[in-house]
Image: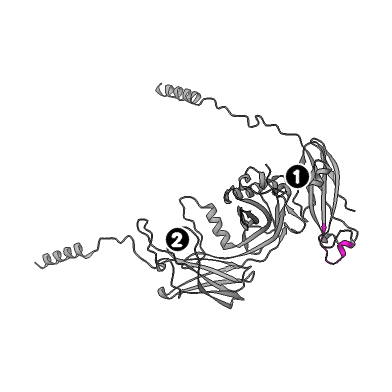
């Protein structure tokens, strides 16, 4: 009989000992903004300069073409020669990108290949693209 | 009668024959403490040799170099071993060092120095002979292999974008026999006072020292940009009378030998009540290992990164100028 009372007492204690814990909603006041994805397939090709003598130099995103010229980018990538695909997450809208490649040949090969100056001469390309919510937009910079 | 005399004598011997006081602190031969990390990018190698000493009730030992350092006559040599034979033997000589600020048991201090180039992927043996104790301390290590940084490269045309939207990825080839790599930056900047501008540099070692056991030929590591700004905020003093201007940044990767890898791994995993120090010094304590440093100099930061350095909440008080060379906020 004693053990039954003890069991009832312990059960009551367990049921009532802890008050309700209010768990705050982590998302209170914060709403995730809708985004779309931009894939930049940053290929390197050239009619006659070997591709291993051309390096990716810059890749930027801006809201307008004017902002590109001013250097007011909203995102930039750390480009490398070991990576061809660059992914950006952006809110829906229209944007501009700028991609830059540089020639690392010695002598006058770079200027012969259309890169201004010689070694470290750069070529730029800029274009407009549109981001749609939950969609992937793909651009392929093409250098003349 | 004879028995009584014998028993009395035995009792007398037992009661007086044994010394019951225990010498808790007994000065034994000191333990050599040796640290030598061969720098494969330098022709000057250094070795630090000190000795253990006893303290009683936390007393600081007297300011005598003899209590912390072995005699200058101690013979220190490193042998290069090729094909099982000693192909070269390099002797170290004592070299007095100027100490930094802080507490040191003695004011005088010297390290040992030798001029030689360390070959990659080669066996080296350290031998220390102490005349005064007739003691030999030795150790071996296998030097790490060369490696190359594959990214970031081409600072002539690339800037480092130090923001979390696209963190920088380091990429490098494997360094043979290396068990640990550390990534870092060396930032060059100007400190502009009212009368003078000084060019300064700050080493930014990223906290992440990591241990790798893999057969891949390439390794990659993504830098946490926020930690870069956090380190600057913690390290550079706030001084409202100074303006600072970012100049350039060098990317650094250091590879360390297995012994150094084990040692740092032990330090990282050490529990508060355990004494799990790693040592590869025979008849002593310490580490004998090697390292290779690779550095790509002279990157600029992207303009957004320079503005973040100037006006970001972590580094705002450091007074860096923005991309236009001014501070206008």
Residue under the point 59% across and 78% down: B88
Query: Residue B44 placed where, x, y %?
Result: 59, 71
* Quadrant (top left/top right/bottom left/bottom right) for the C terminus of chain B: top right
Q: Which image quadrant is residue A137 in? A: top right
Q: Taking B291 as reference, is B58 above or below it? A: above
Residue B134 belongs to magenta span: no
Q: Tell me if residue B173 can be seen.
A: no
Can marks 1 and 2 be said to lie on one chain?
no
Q: Tell me if residue B327 can be seen.
A: yes
Q: Which mark is residue B53?
A: none
Q: Is residue A46 left or right of residue B210?
A: right
Tell me the subunit letter for badge 2: B
Colouring rule applied to residues: one colour
* Quadrant (top left/top right/bottom left/bottom right) for the N terminus of chain B: bottom left
Q: Which image quadrant is residue B150 in? A: bottom right
Tell me the subunit letter for badge 1: A
Question: How far apart, in angstroms, are the residues tagged by discs 1 and 2?
Answer: 49 Å
Q: Taking A34 as reference, is A70 above or below it? A: below
Query: Residue B327 placed where, x, y %?
Result: 68, 46
Does dot 1 land on a helix, a strand or a loop?
A: strand
Q: Which segment did they paint magenta?
A: A102-111
Q: Residue A75 carries which label?
A: 1
Query: Residue B296 placed where, x, y %?
Result: 70, 60
Q: Which residue is disc 2 drawn over?
A: B104
Residue under the point 45% across and 67% down: B108
Does dot 2 land on a helix, a strand or a loop?
A: loop
Residue under the point 45% across and 25% down: A10
Q: Residues within 10 Å of mark 1 (few under 14, many from 20)?
A: many
Residue found farthest to the left: B1
Q: How many marks?
A: 2
Query: Residue B83 placed where, x, y %?
Result: 62, 76
Q: Are marks 1 and 2 in contact (CB under 8 Å)?
A: no
């Amino acid at each position: 009989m004693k053990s039954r009372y003890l069991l009832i007492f312990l059960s009551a204690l367990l049921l009532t000992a802890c008050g309700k814990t209010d768990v705050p909603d982590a998302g209170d006041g914060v709403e995730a903004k809708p985004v779309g994805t931009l894939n930049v397939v940053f290929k390197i090709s050239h009619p006659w300069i070997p591709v291993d003598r051309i390096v990716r130099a810059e890749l930027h995103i801006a809201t307008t073409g004017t902002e590109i010229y001013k250097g007011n980018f909203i995102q930039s990538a750390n480009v490398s020669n070991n990576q061809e695909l660059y992914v950006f997450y952006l809110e829906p809208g229209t944007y501009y990108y700028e991609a830059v490649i540089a020639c690392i040949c010695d002598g006058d090969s770079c200027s012969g290949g259309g890169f201004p100056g010689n070694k470290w001469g750069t070529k730029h390309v800029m274009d407009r693209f549109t981001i749609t919510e939950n969609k992937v937009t793909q651009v392929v910079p093409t250098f003349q | 009668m004879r028995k009584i005399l014998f028993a009395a004598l035995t009792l007398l011997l037992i009661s007086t024959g044994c010394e019951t006081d225990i010498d808790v602190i007994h000065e034994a031969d000191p333990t050599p403490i040796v640290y030598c990390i061969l720098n494969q990018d330098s022709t000057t190698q250094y070795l630090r040799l000190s000795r253990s000493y006893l303290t009683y009730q936390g007393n600081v030992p007297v300011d005598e170099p003899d209590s912390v350092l072995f005699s200058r006559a101690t013979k220190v040599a490193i042998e290069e071993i090729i094909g099982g034979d000693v192909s070269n033997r390099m002797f170290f000589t004592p070299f007095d060092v100027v100490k930094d600020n802080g507490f040191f048991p003695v004011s005088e201090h010297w390290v040992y120095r030798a001029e030689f180039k360390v070959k990659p992927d080669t066996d080296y043996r350290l031998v220390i002979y102490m005349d005064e104790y007739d003691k030999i301390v030795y150790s071996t290590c296998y030097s790490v292999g060369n490696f190359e940084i594959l990214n970031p490269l081409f600072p002539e045309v690339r800037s480092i974008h130090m923001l979390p939207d696209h963190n920088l990825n380091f990429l490098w080839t494997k360094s043979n026999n290396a068990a640990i790599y550390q990534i870092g930056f060396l930032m060059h900047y100007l400190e502009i006072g009212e009368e003078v501008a000084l060019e300064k540099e700050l080493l930014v070692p990223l906290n992440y020292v990591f241990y790798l056991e893999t057969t891949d030929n390439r390794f990659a590591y993504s830098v946490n940009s926020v930690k870069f700004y956090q380190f600057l905020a913690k390290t550079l003093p706030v001084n409202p009378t100074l303006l600072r201007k970012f100049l350039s940044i060098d990317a650094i990767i250091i590879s360390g030998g297995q012994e150094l890898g084990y040692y740092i791994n032990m330090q990282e995993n050490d529990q508060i009540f355990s004494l799990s120090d790693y040592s590869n010094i025979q008849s002593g304590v310490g580490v004998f290992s090697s390292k290779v440093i690779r550095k790509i100099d002279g990157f600029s930061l992207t303009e957004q990164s320079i503005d973040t350095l100037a006006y970001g909440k972590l580094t705002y008080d450091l007074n860096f100028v923005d991309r236009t060379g001014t501070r206008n906020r």
